[in-house]
Image: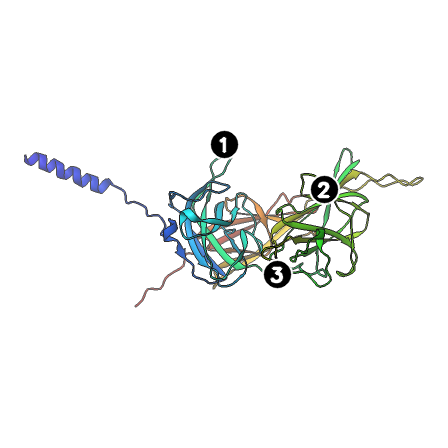
Amino acid sequence: MKGSIASGLIATMFLLVAAPAALAAPANDNFAEAQDLGSLLPQLLSSSNERATEEAGDPRSLSIPQHSVWFRWEAPGTEPVAIDTCHSEFATTLAVFTGSTLGSLEKVGEDTNTDGRYCSSASGVAFRATAGTVYSIMVAGNGFHFPEAPAPATEGTFELSLAPIPKPANDDFSNPVSIETSVTFWVGEEFRSYDAWSDGFTWNATKEPGEPDHAGDLGGASVWFRWTAPRSGPAEFGACDSPDILLGVYTGDAVDALTPVPLESRPMSCFVNFSATSGTTYRIAVDGKLDAETDLPAMATFGIHVSMQGSAPPAEEGKSQAAPQLDTVPPNTKLGGRFLKRKRIWLLRFHSNEPGSTFRCRLDKHRFRRCKSPLRLRHLKPGRHVLKVFAVDAAGNRDRSPAIAHLRVKRRRHRRGR
């Protein structure tokens, strides 16, 4: 009898010692326990979805969210706002909703950050916030991957940013963004492709007095670009990120004295065509359709693309024509920076020896993504980190030797009270 009791005690003690402590999920793991962000704007906070679980009834999105956590924010005013997680250590799915229960949510917007998008003034989920409205924000890991590829990380730390969207720098006709053209040669340099890209947004944009109605719509949130045709012939132009975008192409030097260029829409396409003249500078407007019910123009974040294709121009009769020089020289990338101790932010600046270059950045083992200088890195974990940056010139040449910065973050010391 005594032996049985002793054996039972030993077994019980063994079980108590061997059982591991359960790791707690985040306090805001479920919708009902969303972290209250109040009504402040702007906000920037570091958070984590480590050990978060899936809740029955979690909304499904374009990607399958994993390890979702929730936040709740009340808009202090009626204005365009951007919410993003663009400084995160893993690819996230970010979604914003209205509604008081999990089963009654209505989606305001979503961003599936599958490719490590770079940050901009209107990245993430951009929308018109309404004063007094409570918005529910879900952040989760994006588990999408191809079968032959390894599964991505879907949990870790992320940075949640809420901020009003500033007025676009190219809101006025007098301050357009120039779209630079790059040239690609094919088939013994007998065939050329001319392409130009730029990013932009119409959030918080306005319409100027005397400005024409683009595509025959009143609109009301236009931004401007400038492009010079590298050759004569058919040109293709589009900004396809939103079905409510209006496009206008003009010649002229004053917003109230523009000559519209006839545009031809392509069936089943968001692109339009027009006939370009070599050396002519065209003014391109991107606007949003006016909503008859709200009397407000649609606003969007977009990418703009202008392209031309054709054979190389023939030599003039009686004159020899020099072969075009193809740019094959890669750019050179320079990188420098410093640590802002009080704000605990790394401020990195980089540049290229070739004007018009774009940049790609990679922190530690994350993938390269587009980035802009200056780059601010916040809330890095204590330890050593490596940032690599390379430039891509207008001809598409890539710096094969990225500039490298070795960053060291010391663990903060907390003073003990006496």
**Label 1 is placed on what type of residue?**
Pro
Query: Is residue 3 found left or right of 88 in the rendered image?
Result: left
Residue depicted at x 82% and y 47% = 278
Q: Position of residue 415 (x, y in %)?
A: 35, 64
Lower sequence index among marks 3 and 1:
1
Which residue has dot 3 on it?
167
Which residue has dot 1 on it?
147
Query: Is the residue under label 1 in contact with that under label 3 (CB below 8 Å)?
Result: no
On screen, 302 above or below 39?
above
**Label 2 is placed on what type of residue?**
Thr
Coloring applied to the structure: rainbow
Query: Is residue 409 found left or right of 289 in the rendered image?
Result: left
327 or 65: nearer the viewer: 65
Circle 3 crowding by C-alpha within 10 Å: few under 14, some 14–19, many from 20: some
Which residue has dot 2 on it?
328
User: How many marks can you see?
Assistant: 3
